[in-house]
Image: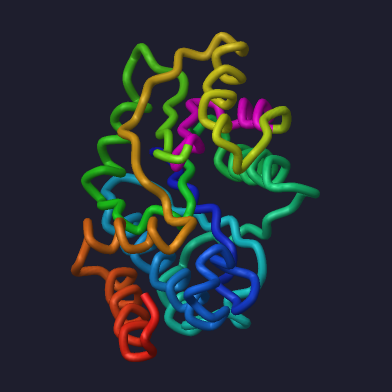
Amino acid sequence: MTVLLVVAKAPVPGAAKTRLCPPATPGQAARIAAAALRDTLDAVAATPGVTPVLALAGRLADAEDGVDLAAAVAGWPVLPQRGKDFAARLAHAHADVAAAYPKRPVLQIGMDTPQLTAARLAGAVRRLGAADTDAVLGRAADGGWWALGLRDPRHADALRTVPMSTPDTGRLTWTALAERDLRVGPLPVLRDVDSWADALAVAGAVPGGRFAREVAALRRILVVGGRR
């Protein structure tokens, strides 16, 4: 059974989705981040045949909607993120899962793609399980990536050499995996949420979710305040 690993930051004002500020305030950005995380957790929970795990930076007790988020992950293993930078935290998260769930494949996602559905996640799990695949990578439209799947999660150590949050992160991650002689399969390209323009576009694609409702609420505030 595949481990579906969610790597997330507790949506604390001033620490989460700061690139949405402006137009959002830190509190509004944190509420949008909390909605994105909750939509993601719901999609994971609805995905059949996986073991969900959360690797968390920060504390849900300090977060916007922390009570609801804690309820959403009740019963999930929650691992603290560790490492001096994001690449190290990702590598450690995969290593921790490998130790807890030996010989299990891992599909890792973040909280920046609230448009994910259980069907899309199930498709990624099937792709990772294909006989000709050792890894899968879902690139993001900005050059990064939104999903990484590994038959052997110990290979996530390759991420330590990859600069994160750059327009070349996706390409360099693919190269780092290929240099380990891993057969990498592509997943669909998605737009992740970094900027306000990203938030508007993603909310428009999934208008029925919590994320879309929070984005719509902020849009109404901006219109009333005379800003767009």
The residue lying toward the viewer, choosing from 151 and 58, is 58
Residue drawn at x 60%, y 61% is: 56
Q: Quadrant of residue 132?
A: top left
Position of residue 97 relative to residue 202, above or below, is above
Position of residue 124 relative to residue 44, above or below, is above
The quadrant of the rendering that contains the C terminus is: bottom left
Residue drawn at x 46%, y 33% is: 149
The residue lying toward the viewer, choosing from 167 and 172, is 167
Point out residue 100 in the picture as x, y percentages from the top left corner: 61, 45
The residue lying toward the viewer, choosing from 116 and 96, is 116
Position of residue 119 relative to residue 43, above or below, is above
Point out residue 77 in the picture as x, y percentages from the top left corner: 54, 60
The quadrant of the rendering that contains the N terminus is: top left
Q: Is residue 30 among the parts visible in the rendering?
A: yes
Residue drawn at x 57%, y 17% is: 175
148 relative to 92 in the view: left or right: left
95 relative to 130 in the view: left or right: right
Q: Give the residue at the far bottom of this rendering.
A: 224
Colour setting = rainbow
Residue drawn at x 43%, y 73% is: 32
Point out residue 68 in the picture as x, y percentages from the top left corner: 43, 81
Q: Give the residue at the far right of this rendering.
A: 84
Q: Quadrant of residue 126?
A: top left
> In the rendered picture of this protein, how many numbered marks are placed on residues?
0
Point out residue 87 in the picture as x, y percentages from the top left corner: 68, 40
| Magenta stretch encompasses residue 135 | no
Q: Is residue 107 among the parts visible in the rendering?
A: no
- Find the magenta span and give its range: 143-159
